[in-house]
Amino acid sequence: MTGMNGVVQAGAHAPVGLPMPPDPEVVERPHRRQFTAAYKLGILEEADGCHAPGQLGALLRREGLYSSHLRDWRQQRTQGTLNALTPRRRGRPPTPAHEIELARLRQENDRLSRKLAAAEAIVEIQKKVSALLALTQPSDDGDGRR
């Protein structure tokens, strides 16, 4: 049912207490377009050949591009490398293998240092307990007594 302001009210057709099914046109998440270097170069060549008024706009509409795409791609092209035109991966760059190995070795070193400190503490405690209980072996005087 439509309200006074033209908004469809949720309770008009759906049973009370049940959620509305999702709109099938909105279910799929958008994904980022990626353009190959060959496509970028082809579009730039075609854009450079546009001299008549409105011809460049028609090209952009036909391809679904923005003028900022052309600006960025031209800037990348003037940098002189084809690699600049290839799509770059987003996000944090991967950690180099030597840094991963270094972190693993540091963790192992810390673990072994803690284990060594615990073992040394146990040995010290054993020495003190032995001295307190006088369990140390007396030196032999030759009389055979203990």
Image: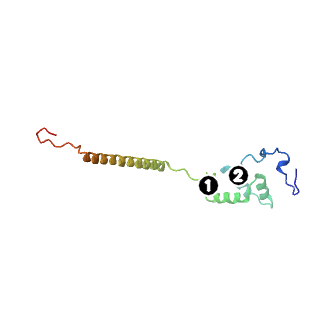
Image coords of residue 84 (percent x, y): 61, 55
Query: Residue 141 appears at what percent x and percent y?
Result: 12, 42
- Does 144 appear above or below 94? above
Q: Nearer the viewer, residue 123 or 41?
A: 123
Q: Is residue 44 above or below residue 28?
A: below
- What quarter of the picture does the C terminus occupy? top left
Are there few (<14), some (14-19), or many (20+) residues within 10 Å of tag 2? few
Compared across the picture, whether 90 is left or right of 146 comes to right
- Circle 2 sits on which residue? 42
Q: How is the rendered protein coloured?
A: rainbow
Quote the CA–CA distance across marks 2 and 1.
15 Å
Q: Residue at x 69, y 60 (%)?
A: 71
Seen from the viewer's position, the closer of residues 78 and 49 is 78
Residue 60: percent from left, percent from top: 76, 56
Residue under the point 14% across and 39% down: 145
- Label 1, residues with CA under 10 Å away: few <14, some 14-19, many ≥20: some
Q: Which residue is mark 1?
A: 84
Residue plotted at (36% across, 47% down): 118
Residue 107, relative to residue 5: is it above or below? Answer: above
Drawn side of residue 135 relative to residue 25, left or right? left
Amino acid on which the number 1 mark rests in the picture: Ala
Q: Residue at x 78, y 52 (%)?
A: 62
Residue 50 x %, y % = 76, 58
Mark 2–mark 1 contact, CB under 8 Å? no
Residue 126, disc: none
Q: Secondary structure at mark 1?
A: helix
Kind of residue sitting beneath label 2: Gly
Task: Give the mark nearer the N terminus: 2 vs 1.
Answer: 2
Q: Which secondary structure lies at badge 2?
A: helix
